[in-house]
Amino acid sequence: MHDPVTLDQLRTLVAVAEAGSFSGAARRLQRVQSAVSTAMANLEGHLGVVVFDRAPRIPALTDAGRAVLASARRVLAEVDGLRRLTTDLADGLEAHVSLCVDALFPVPALVELCASFARHFPSVDLRVDTQTLSAVSERVLSGSSTLGVVSPLGIAPGLERQVLGPVRMIPVVAAAHPLAKKRGPLPVAAFADCVQIVLSERHDDGVPDQAVLSPRTWRVADLHTKHALLRAGLGWGNLPAHLVEADLKARRLVAIHPSAWGEDEHVLYLSAVYRADAAFGRAHRWALAELERLCVGRPRSRVAGKSR
């Protein structure tokens, strides 16, 4: 059914309200005053309510008119947003960006990315997922995520790769754990009776557990559970430097030094991954560049490995 209320009438209503009079709105809209008066009379007729009290010398909004004005402003804002969106889409801007990051990616950097994305692309939906190891690549290969951030062990064949920056993994235990009382490099024998908490795939056919020294292991599927178990003194394991920085300063966790591991074994490079057939628009290209900036621009101690 044809709706007789027009956007022009709504814009004229807003102009009258802002100018304070029909004549002021006419000057603003570069129309004759009679055209403005006719538009408002037609609007009132279509809506079936009195929008203006014409008894005073200068017509004033009625209570109903003020309600109509508020609604008109909302409608016009939505229409203007729609026009911006379609203009952006025609200019090559995507409707949405879907990002899947490895659990090792620093949360503060992810928050900074999302906040900046919202400012730069207010009309683009951003979908964020967090996974572990090969699950990131699976999301990208399936098309449920168009852009991923993953550690080397989780990169699947067939994906394009762009190195972003390093993440340092630190072997830690709670301050009250027996290993915390030992000084210097720890031989493998020192871990014989200690539980090692290992970040593992959610399914058995994924990437094998990495950097396991203890014969006894507890497997967890997310980094925050591992962090909580280590802080509770229930075992030892590797955590990203950015996640344990405050714990190390407060002595809630203590860094240890297994003699079986060299220093470089605990630095890995996160990479952005995407399908070879991906056609990136402005928002995806911006997100890729921003991921690199956030990783490269952070101090090594804060973004900082191959072992888990």
Image (cartoon, grey):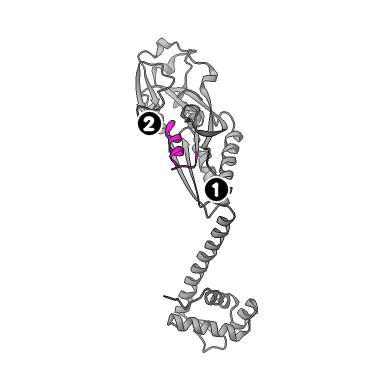
Please tell me which residue is depicted at 40% across the width and 23% down the height of the picture.
Answer: 209
Q: Sequence order check: which comes first, mark 1 or mark 2?
A: 1
Residues at marks 1 and 2 touching, judged by CB atoms closer than 8 Å: no
- Which span of residues is magenta-colored? 133-147
Pointer 2 residue: 221
62 in magenta = no
In the picture, the quarter occupied by the C terminus is top left
Which of these two is toward me, 165 or 187? Answer: 165
| Residue 298, above or below 305 | below
Secondary structure state at the residue bearing disc 1? helix
Q: Could you tell me what secondary structure mostly forms the magenta stretch?
A: helix
Please tell me in which quadrant of the rendered image residue 289 appears. top right
Q: Residues within 10 Å of mark 1 (few under 14, many from 20)?
A: some
Residue 11, position as x, y percentages in the image: 55, 74
Callout 2: SS:
loop
Picture coordinates of residue 49 (x, y %)? 43, 82
Residue placed at 41% from the left, 18% from the top?
Answer: 212
